[in-house]
Image (cartoon, rainbow, N blue to C red):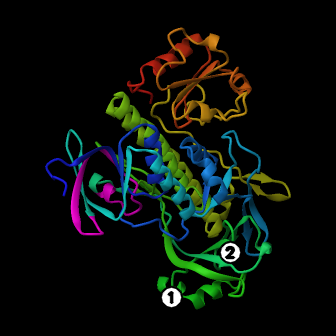
Amino acid sequence: MQDKSTPEEFDVVIVGRGPVGATLANLLGLCGVRTLVLDREARTYHLPRAVHFDDECMRVFQTIGLADAILPHVILSPGMLFLDAGGRMLLDWSRPQALTPMGWNLSYRFHQPDLEDVLISGLARWPHIALRSRCDVFALDQDETGVRVRYEDLANGQLSEVRAGYVIGCDGARSLVRRFIGSGMDDLGFHERWLVIDVLLKRDRGDLGDYSIQHCDPRRPATYVRGTGTRRRWEITVLPDEDSQDVAQPAKVWELLSRWITPDDAEIERAAVYTFHSVIAQQWRSERLLLAGDSAHQTPPFLGQGMCAGIRDAANLAWKLGAIIRDGAAPELLDTYQSERQPHVREFIELAIRLGGVINTKAIEAGLAVGEARANAPVKLEVKKPLLGPGLALDGLPLAGHLAPQFELSDGRSSDDRTGYNHVLLVETAAALPSRLTQSQAGIAILTGDDAEGVGHWLCEHRIIAALVRPDRYVRGTARNDSELERLVAAVTAPTHVPSAA
């Protein structure tokens, strides 16, 4: 038995090994950070949950070297259509099938257990990453030097503890870590019960289509989603006078599905009532304790951005933890995490709520106003990703807080594969670089128009001569002239300093 007077030590403990926790652990593996992942479950949850992620998430999966392993498990989504009770299209949210500036497609459908298996298998590549299942964390005690993490091994009832520099709660809506932080929740006002039904088709039903369909019917709003393989999902509103257990019984489920399918067409894999929430934690960090994913925010599913938001949290947080633990950056760097991510996720949640108003027919006109009205055609929706909130962005410089594109290199590779999970300075030519900034500088990659033709075009399009891109692919700042380039270089060469950007 381990001597309790000398507990194991880790740089980071992650509580929860779902997609967000597993992605964060893989990113910390890239950063060389000693990490322990604790999860109370014995194995991956076998039923579907999240079903969509976007191009930015796939770019993160590319960063951790797992995109190729994930691709066989996904299909491309053509988008979502909103229909009224008579079948007339109210809102057209079709997704282009061409690659986006991220280097990936805009919308992917997936089966969450498949994704989790790939992410968790990827942890085996990192000797400094440990995963312990059936371990239930029950206490977190932090002091000025770290956090004591106490947990029970549910396989044998043994109590254990480890020490960590930081603890990240990726432990969902009922987060224990959030309780220890003591954070309240900002309620954005959307709370509805929906019956989620996952089925496996027994025979071809191509007529159901590949588009997600929002049936904006005031009698009973419903959603249809094409999944991978034979998987199909319906989400159907539970009426106020209905009992959650009664409505999930097979006879009632088939009654509700009867307008689309019968038992001859499919078998039910899961039917359960969920309450869709719209809440954001008020405090994402207390010294050495932090939140990511559903522990920090919950959104109605109408944008398909719930898991995506958590993956963005992980990408934002991991490189900052790496800079502090590995490179000696100031711990105050973590102060920029909530200030950047919270406004971003709030904007997505508020848009999801507005689309919910179209679906449940309670605020159709206000919801349609988010799209582009067209003569004799349905409203067209194109969702622009929000900007990061104030944090590390260099104040007053163009494009700060925007996502940077990914470029095709002259040898055919993608630029992220070359630059890695590092800061990247984009310049037209190497000759434009100040002499003190060289290719050999640790943690800095330099990409020029000679490496990728698109770099020069992008700089010219935005009338800038250089851009500093963070490891999570967001622009930290740009330069229109030599003096602004010097400012970028100062940010690159003094990475441990946290500028007062806001």
Q: Secondary structure at mark 1?
A: helix
Residue 176 visible at all: yes
Residue 81 image offset from top left, x and y in percent: 73, 63
Q: Amino acid at mark 2?
A: Asp
Q: Which residues are magenta?
A: 153-179
Which one is nearer the viewer's eye here, 327 or 252?
327
Mark 2 and mark 1 in contact? Answer it, CB < 8 Å: no
Residue plotted at (36% across, 60% down):
175
Task: Check disc 1 and report the residue beneath it.
Answer: 246
Residue 57 image offset from top left, x and y in percent: 58, 48
In the picture, the disc for residue 217 is 2
In the picture, the disc for residue 129 is none
**Vertical relation: 281 (above or below) 408:** below
Q: Residue furthest bottom?
A: 251
Q: Is residue 160 magenta?
A: yes
Q: Amino acid at mark 1?
A: Asp
Compared across the picture, whether 450 is left or right of 156 comes to: right
Q: Residue furthest right?
A: 376
Q: Earlier in the sequence, mark 2 or mark 1?
A: 2
Which one is nearer the viewer's eye here, 456 or 360?
456
Compared across the picture, whether 357 is left or right of 319 comes to: right
**Vertical relation: 125 (above or below) 213:** above
Compared across the picture, whether 93 is left or right of 438 comes to: right
In which quadrant will I find the C terminus? Answer: top left
